[in-house]
């Protein structure tokens, strides 16, 4: 934006200040005058330098005093402000040489760039309309509180700023001691700020912490703090030791393809195994988004065979060499009511995921699906297909996993009808295929009508009428996960009508001189349905009712199985007492109850709590005496064996600065293993009959800029730890350090990963990088 010396200058009063008047002289626009006046400047000296024939922006200035010399030197003094285009300049004194076109500013100089960046200096000298220049004692303040300073500045074409003896930081400067070094800073021989491409480059730079040098960079490049995404190398990673990788180094590169898509490529080189390259592609479309993550490596860690939980020899010797994985996800909106998508997760082997720390390692399976779903007023529909890949062969193998081809789900809830009730319907139909195990097709339909009402005694009633119907075509029922007593293929089904009436009768009283309240609420329910004998060994497929939960949370449920392949039939009644006390910041809440059933199904899942006409009592208790303590416990007690068949508790206590948590869970079995093998034929040493008896404990602490947390989980029945871990860290306005420790004792794929220690360093406006060990 050059300003030739021959441009005519006119004051607000219209008196000619130049020797000649040229056609096309432009005065400042009225809105510019108004905006300038808002700053309280002396508007009697507002002057505009008109646009030349090259269509350059005019230069507008405000000054308390002005003077003109015969040699063409114009001097403005006293709170001088100059605008040209999107640039604004302020100084104590500014001189403009009309012969050379040089604009010089001295004293408390501040230059505001179009993006909001402000440059402060003792002296700035510009030519070509503030695009080229030099300066001394430079201080640049950018977004996110980032600061760049230097002894001197050379500005080229308004796009490049070269600073000598530069320093950069995003930390706050101490107000009481401004000469003290910031928490961290880059101190370089010189730095280049590329305004056009939004990058800052440092030559011969030291990273200093609290004024002490800790790391040297011959060259370091970073994005401008105003940049949200930009192509370039990301922070490298280094791990000195890993059990499977050894010492390894990672270097990612980010490519911002355009405003809606990008690609990140990361290379990994290790000392114990072959290299790996991974890439992630992301695309945000107008109607959806796509994310594809994949990798390929040459894995030299040979897999070994081992004996799993069930005494089976598993494992493969071909899980090395060229290995890879693909995790792809896409979601697309068809219109306002329908959308479709896919989640594809595949890996060549679990050992490869373990060796290269691929996300998802540690899960039992990798799940993949494609779907189409729709939303309506009170309704929802979905069609999908699902497939699974087993990762932990110590528990499950790929041959035992199903393919769902396809599954259809639909649910609808209507508006209140003329009788005051509400109708809801639901269906879930599917085709399940297993190469080893039960294969079946199911058609299912359920309809439920609920009618709430009250009476003058304050009783709250709920009348429910429900019908469940299911039709199956199945084969190989004698295999997993059913292990039925018969085989072959056959068609079967069930229809179960159910009617229930539930009554809640809450009573309320106050105490403690009106500062406390108590709710005493008896609850009673009666459920009538045919006794279908839906026991564990019924010769009918079971895909969604693989566990039975009888606790205080399901005491009043119509069906206490998790799905509808097994249904609670027969005549039964459920009774309970719910109480709640609140006073002066204290609270106590409890629920106890039992189920009374006419029919007994002795071959139900063991330890269900329903082996007699009168069930095991269930209950829960939550005590919160103040804001510092919270205790919750729930359980089920067997009065015939005088044992607790299920129990869990959770304790949380402490102050905001320090919080302690502890938990405990107990069950006489390990429900996870029930359908992995036929427990009836496996004898008393079956994995299902191993007790679940675990305790967890942890804490979290925060003090000023420091934080710490730790957790531990131990199996009391197995007399071994399950997992331990902890974090300790520091964070302030510009820096964060976290040291994390993780120890997993669970064996996956026959092997246990070693202890992991991670160091994460976060520098504001630069990024986060970590070191794993």
Image (cartoon, rainbow, N blue to C red):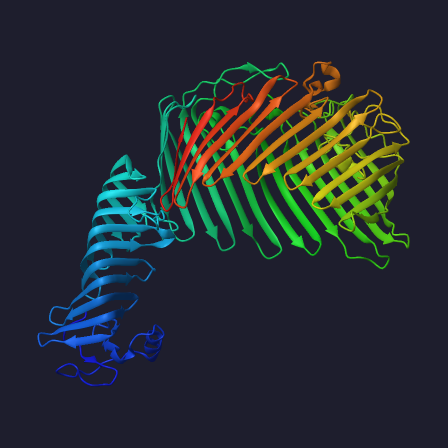
Q: Position of residue 498 (x, y in %)?
A: 86, 41
- Tag count: 0
418 over 473 or under it: above or below: below
Q: Position of residue 686 (x, y in %)?
A: 69, 16
* Visible residue check, residue 539: no
Q: Residue furthest left?
A: 71
Q: Quadrant of the N terminus?
A: bottom left
Q: Quadrant of residue 295?
A: top left
Q: Quadrant of the C terminus?
A: top left
Q: Relative to the observer, which residue lies in front, 252 or 276?
A: 252
* Visible residue check, residue 99: yes
Q: Quadrant of residue 195?
A: bottom left
Q: Relative to the observer, which residue lies in front, 388 or 457?
A: 457
Q: Is residue 477 left or right of residue 255?
A: right
Write the residue at 28% across / 35% down.
215
Q: Is residue 501 left or right of residue 438?
A: right
Q: Relative to the observer, which residue lies in front, 528 or 83?
A: 83
Q: Position of residue 419 (x, y in %)?
A: 86, 57
Q: Relative to the observer, which residue lies in front, 169 or 691?
A: 169
240 over 180 or under it: above or below: above
Write the residue at 79% across / 24% down.
537
Q: Position of residue 242 (x, y in %)?
A: 42, 23
Q: Quadrant of residue 587?
A: top right
């Amino acid at each position: 934006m050059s300003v030739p010396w021959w441009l005519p200058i006119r004051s607000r009063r219209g008196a000619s200040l130049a020797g000649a008047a040229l056609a096309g002289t432009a005065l400042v626009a009225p809105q510019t005058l108004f905006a300038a006046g808002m700053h309280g400047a002396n508007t009697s000296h507002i002057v505009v330098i008109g646009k030349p024939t090259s269509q350059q922006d005019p230069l507008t200035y405000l000054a308390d005093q002005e003077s003109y010399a015969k040699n063409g030197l114009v001097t403005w003094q006293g709170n001088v402000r100059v605008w040209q285009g999107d640039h604004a300049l302020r100084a104590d004194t500014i001189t403009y040489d009309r012969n050379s076109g040089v604009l010089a500013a001295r004293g408390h100089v501040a230059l505001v760039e179009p993006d909001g960046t402000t440059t402060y200096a003792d002296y700035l000298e510009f030519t070509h309309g503030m695009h080229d220049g030099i300066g001394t004692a430079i201080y640049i303040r950018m977004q996110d509180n980032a600061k760049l300073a230097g002894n001197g500045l050379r500005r080229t074409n308004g796009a490049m700023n070269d600073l000598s003896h530069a320093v950069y930081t995003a930390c706050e400067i101490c107000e009481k001691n401004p000469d003290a070094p910031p928490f961290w800073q880059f101190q370089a021989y010189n730095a280049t700020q590329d305004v056009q491409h939004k990058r800052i480059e440092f030559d011969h730079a030291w990273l200093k912490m609290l004024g002490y040098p800790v790391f040297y960079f011959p060259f370091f490049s970073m994005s401008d703090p105003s940049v949200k995404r930009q192509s370039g190398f990301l922070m490298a990673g280094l791990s000195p030791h890993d059990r499977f990788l050894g010492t390894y180094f990672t270097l990612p590169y980010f490519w911002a393809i355009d405003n809606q898509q990008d690609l990140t490529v990361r290379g990994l080189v290790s000392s114990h195994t072959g290299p790996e390259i991974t890439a992630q592609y992301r695309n945000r479309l107008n109607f959806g988004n796509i994310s594809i993550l994949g990798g390929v490596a040459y894995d030299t860690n040979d897999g070994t065979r081992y004996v799993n939980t069930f005494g089976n020899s598993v494992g493969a010797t071909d899980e090395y060499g060229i290995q890879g994985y693909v995790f792809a996800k896409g979601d697309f909106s068809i219109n306002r009511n329908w959308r479709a998508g896919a989640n594809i997760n595949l890996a060549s082997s679990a050992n490869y995921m373990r060796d290269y720390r691929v996300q998802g390692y540690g899960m039992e399976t990798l799940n993949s699906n494609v779907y189409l779903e729709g939303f309506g007023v009170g309704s929802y529909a979905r069609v999908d297909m699902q497939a699974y890949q087993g990762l932990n062969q110590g528990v499950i193998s790929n041959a035992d996993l199903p393919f769902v081809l396809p599954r259809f789900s639909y649910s609808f809830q209507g508006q209140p009808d003329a009788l005051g009730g509400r109708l809801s319907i639901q269906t879930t139909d599917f085709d399940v295929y297993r190469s080893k195990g039960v294969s079946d097709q199911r058609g299912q339909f359920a309809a439920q009508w609920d009618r709430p009402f009250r009476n003058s005694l304050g009783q709250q009633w709920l009348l429910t009428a429900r019908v469940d119907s299911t039709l199956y075509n199945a084969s190989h029922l004698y295999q997993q996960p059913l292990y039925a007593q018969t085989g072959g293929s056959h068609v079967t089904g069930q229809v179960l009508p159910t009617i229930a009436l539930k009554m809640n009768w809450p009573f309320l009283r106050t105490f403690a001189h009106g500062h406390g309240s108590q709710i005493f609420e008896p609850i009673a329910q009666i459920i009538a349905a045919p006794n279908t004998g839906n026991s564990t060994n019924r010769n009918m497929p079971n895909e969604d009712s693989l566990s039975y939960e009888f606790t205080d949370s399901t005491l009043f449920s119509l069906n206490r199985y998790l799905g509808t392949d097994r249904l609670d039939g027969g005549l039964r009644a459920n009774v309970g007492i719910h109480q709640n006390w609140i006073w002066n910041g204290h609270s106590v809440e409890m629920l106890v109850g039992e189920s009374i059933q006419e029919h007994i199904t002795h071959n139900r899942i063991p330890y269900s709590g329903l082996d007699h006409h009168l069930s095991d009592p269930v209950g829960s208790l939550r005590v919160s005496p103040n804001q510092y303590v919270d205790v919750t416990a729930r359980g089920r007690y067997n009065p015939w064996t005088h044992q607790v068949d299920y129990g869990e508790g959770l304790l949380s206590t402490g102050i905001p600065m320090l919080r302690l948590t502890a938990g405990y869970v107990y069950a006489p079995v390990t429900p996870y293993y029930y359908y992995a093998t036929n427990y009836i034929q496996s004898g008393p040493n079956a994995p299902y009959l191993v007790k679940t008896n675990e305790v967890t404990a942890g804490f979290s602490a925060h003090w000023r800029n420091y934080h710490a947390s730790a957790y531990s989980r131990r199996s009391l029945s197995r007399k071994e730890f399950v997992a331990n871990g902890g974090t300790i860290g520091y964070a302030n306005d510009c820096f964060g350090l976290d040291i994390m420790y993780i120890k997993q004792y669970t064996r996956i794929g026959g092997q246990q990963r070693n202890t992991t220690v991670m160091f994460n360093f976060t520098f504001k406006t630069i990024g986060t990088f970590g070191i794993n060990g």
